[in-house]
Amino acid sequence: MLRALTSALRLPRPWRPLQTRSCASDGAAGDPEIQVRALAGPDQGITEILMNRPSARNALGNVLVSELLEALARLREDQQVRVLLFRSGVKGVFCAGADLKEREQMSEAEVGIFVQRLRGLMNEIASSAVMGLIETTRGLLPGAGGTQRLPRCLGVALAKELIFTGRRLSGAQAQALGLVNHTVPQNEEGNAAYHRARALAQEILPQAPIAVRLGKVAIDRGMDVDIASGMAIEGICYAQNIPTQDRLEGMAAFREKRPPRFVGK
């Protein structure tokens, strides 16, 4: 049991960096629905995924979901990426949720497959070893899995109330419930949430990348088990951090009273 858990909690092997790229709507022609951009200069280590499907208010259709899954599969093993930032290229909207117009044209079997893929996308974002940040003007990235994620965030009673009523929440209400960490007044450009998310990414950026990744693994895996098992998971994660250069660099920097220079090894 412990051996299997240790294997499951190992960090992925390094992958070659993902270059700035776009994904076309039909693979051969059409405007891109996402763009992946690695920031440079002082923001090096932050990668942005820009969703750009204005005709459907960034609704999650087959193409958009496929492109996001493809990008995440490559980014999650790219050791150059320290923070992943989702943003919208459509002014006034982050993501309208599932594309119901597209779903209306699907057969029952196709609906089942699509919802499974959508759920997989949400799981990929949540479980990625990369530190994920979601920038949004409206709260959470909508998607499948709400009956399981919401009770874990809010408790069973309040989750049932919100799901059964289909109630819409303002940003302030979502923050008061703990669904989002921050709300900000909108600016004239309509990108105030993006700037707040990017500022948070800049706070994470100088931290030891391996420790951040392992911390996310320990928290995510530990939340699904009892406290004793969670402590074991934390121990396994910390054991992976002990032999790293970054741990020694952090200790040296503290001793010498200087900023650390982490390399992700």
Image (cartoon, rainbow, N blue to C red):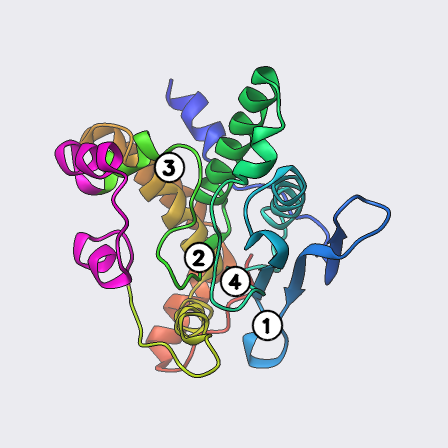
Nearest to viewer (mark 1 / mark 3): 1
Foreground tag (4 vs 3): 4
Q: Which residue is mark 3?
A: 236
Q: Nearer the viewer, residue 68 or 129?
A: 68
Binning the other alpha carbons within 10 Å of mark 4 as few (below 14), some (14 to 19) or many (20 upward) gives many
Q: Which residue is mark 2?
A: 134
Mark drawn on residue 200: none
The chief SS type of the magenta part is helix
Q: Which residues are magenta?
A: 154-181
Classify mark 3: residues with Cα within 10 Å, few (<14), some (14-19) or many (20+): some
Q: What's under tag 3, amino acid-wise?
A: Ile
Q: Position of residue 114 (x, y in %)?
A: 57, 28
Q: Which residue is mark 1?
A: 44
Mark 4: which secondary structure? Answer: strand
Which residue does the numbered mark 4 point to in the structure image? 87
Q: Nearer the viewer, residue 152 or 211?
A: 152
- Residue 211 in the image, given as x and y percentages of width and height: 41, 55
